[in-house]
Amino acid sequence: MKIAVDAMGGDKAPEVVIEGTAEALELYPFMDIVLVGHEQRISHLLKHHGITNHPRLRLVHAEQAIAMNEPSMSAVRGKKNSSMTICAELVQKGEADAVVSAGHTGAAVAATTFRMKLLPGVERAGIAAIMPSTKGHFVFIDAGANVDCKPIHLAQFAIMGEIFAKSMGVHRPKVGLLSIGEEDVKGNDLTKEAFKMLSTMPINFIGNVEGKLLYERVADVVVCDGFVGNIVLKSSESLAKAISFWIKKAFTKNTLRQASAILAKNAFKELKEIADYEEYGGAPLLGVNGVCIIGHGSSSPKAIKNAIRVAGEIVKFKVNEHITARLAECGIAVKGHGN
Amino acid sequence: MKIAVDAMGGDKAPEVVIEGTAEALELYPFMDIVLVGHEQRISHLLKHHGITNHPRLRLVHAEQAIAMNEPSMSAVRGKKNSSMTICAELVQKGEADAVVSAGHTGAAVAATTFRMKLLPGVERAGIAAIMPSTKGHFVFIDAGANVDCKPIHLAQFAIMGEIFAKSMGVHRPKVGLLSIGEEDVKGNDLTKEAFKMLSTMPINFIGNVEGKLLYERVADVVVCDGFVGNIVLKSSESLAKAISFWIKKAFTKNTLRQASAILAKNAFKELKEIADYEEYGGAPLLGVNGVCIIGHGSSSPKAIKNAIRVAGEIVKFKVNEHITARLAECGIAVKGHGN
């Protein structure tokens, strides 16, 4: 199994990416890694981690890198030699099974969709984020790949999310549609149509999931369009950050509270770990013909290492083959689309 | 000034509503309150709080009440004698200046829109929620009145939010559009068109506000459609609840942590107060021809009392007159719409 890693993607690239890659090489002996990045800029880092001539590491030079603030389309079209684009090309040419990038999400979506194309019958790829809840994790799709969706896209996301949840061991995943009320008549034009479509499919569809129940895990898979998904995901991160700011402020106000915080330092550590995306490493972009894991921009070495692991698991579980078969089974593979 | 209060609206109505009304009567001597509810069901509560023959309280009987789980449209059409509908009629007939209800949000929107109609030039009313952030509060509109919006609706919400922020003392409020990227080209079809419209208006428009910055208060007013708004508001409440659950779990795990929690009990109290909607009491439904404050379903007496206060402030500040004038000034009053 070969995983292409975008050495130049992420806020702290290439340093953290190389460190995470070195950890993955040590931990996962069944994996080969193709590191794509600027040779001169990464050679000392490879040396530092003692992986310069590692037998399971291949280095591919990329002259360019896509910055976090570039418009995705023009970056992908204009920078044909970017590390992200070359990663996608490696999968396209069969030289790698999966791509891992903690870089520009939009560019990763565009590059993989252009180069690797979509799975047969798939109209849009969707980002499947893993979210915490009071009762364990759930899959949240689309977390930001497609802003303007049609009902068929939400129906296809439901299948992708279902297969992804199954790959993580969930039996007969419950699928919910993110909306503003429980009843089928509640929602916007998009969700009302998607509701009808999902109701006719042979899946474990539990109906609408309201925002107020999102973090209570009423479903194993929650489906929404990428505009709503991105905003929910990012505003949740923003709120968690704000709450953490308020907690810090409250617990540093006086000596008594500071002492209390020291006593309970393990409690704070545990709280931090709950929403720790480092554990999942990244979110798969499902629906593309190949495997692509999109890491958080601020990924740590641990997050990179875990993103590489997740990529391997998705390849191993044959998530894509299952998606293709299940779309056909559910009668929602769109002819003339995908590879 | 006369405020109509829906005695039957809310999870804990009529008990908490009557208690909140009694507090408001005592605190706000410049207000008359018209309490609308089922006479027999509330008479003992009025007696209990000693306001049966209060000189500034008028009782209006309502034979029906709208339950929290009824479909809004059929509830409003079918129950012409519901407390919510009668409240809206009182404003329509000039017998009250404002309505306060902690009942069914959809029914409150439908009843006020049908009875009170919209302000001249307004196409849709929007719910203006007050949200906490690390740098103070901001106005979030539309928090759930309209699921399928057009660009003009978002432009009108911007004005309503601006005036509401001004009524709370913000000078030249910064207005942002909730979207998925900073640049004007980022967003869905709706926000991209709304961005263009907002850019031409004589307001302090700061462009898109991303989810990741929502709780850092980059804008005084954040505009979005009611589908996204409802989901962001409710999923944020859900996340805050989940975090509070995790904190409780972490701080009760062993005796040391329990002791620490006791030491820091004021810190926890302060944290709870940050997101305390009781302080704002409720969110105004802006754009209707009259004042309507929608309280949280689980409103406490304090929340009801504050919702009554907010209703009075909006009447006093003449928010509606300012909105009408400002829509015309900005060239986005739609002819043939509203009253």
Image (cartoon, coloured by chain):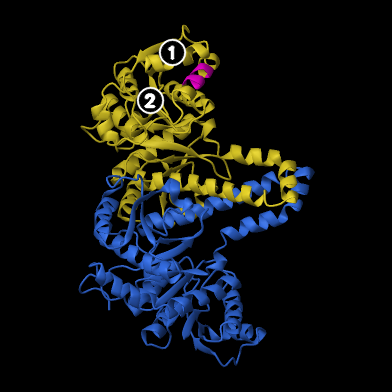
Chain colours: A yellow, B blue
Query: Which residue is at a point 37% across and 65% down the rendered structure image?
Result: B162
User: Is A19 in the magenta?
Assistant: yes
Name the spot of residue A198 as percent of width and height, x first: 36, 46
- Identify the image quadrant of the C terminus of chain A: top left
User: Is A28 in the magenta?
Assistant: no
Magenta stretch, main secondary structure class: helix
Question: On the picture, is A307 further left or further right than B241?
Answer: left
Q: Give the SS element for disc 1.
A: helix
In which quarter of the view is residue A192 placed? bottom left
Query: Which residue is at a point 48% across and 56% down the rendered structure image?
Result: B234
Name the spot of residue B322 as percent of width and height, x first: 34, 75
Three-letter amino acid code at the position of disc 2: Val
Question: Does residue A251 appear anywhere in the picture?
Answer: yes
Three-letter amino acid code at the position of disc 1: Ser
Residue that numbered label 2 is attached to: A291
- Of badges 2 and 1, nearer the viewer stands 1
Chain letter, disc 2 residue: A
Chain letter, disc 1 residue: A
Residue A43 bears which disc, if any?
A: 1
Please tell me how crowded label 1 is: few (under 14), some (14-19), or many (20+) other residues with Cα within 10 Å: some
Q: Magenta region: which residues?
A: A18-23
Query: Which residue is at a point 51% across and 58% down the rendered structure image?
Result: B136
Name the spot of residue A163 as percent of width and height, x first: 42, 33
Question: On the picture, is A93 further left or further right than A309?
Answer: left
- Identify the image quadrant of the N terminus of chain A: top left
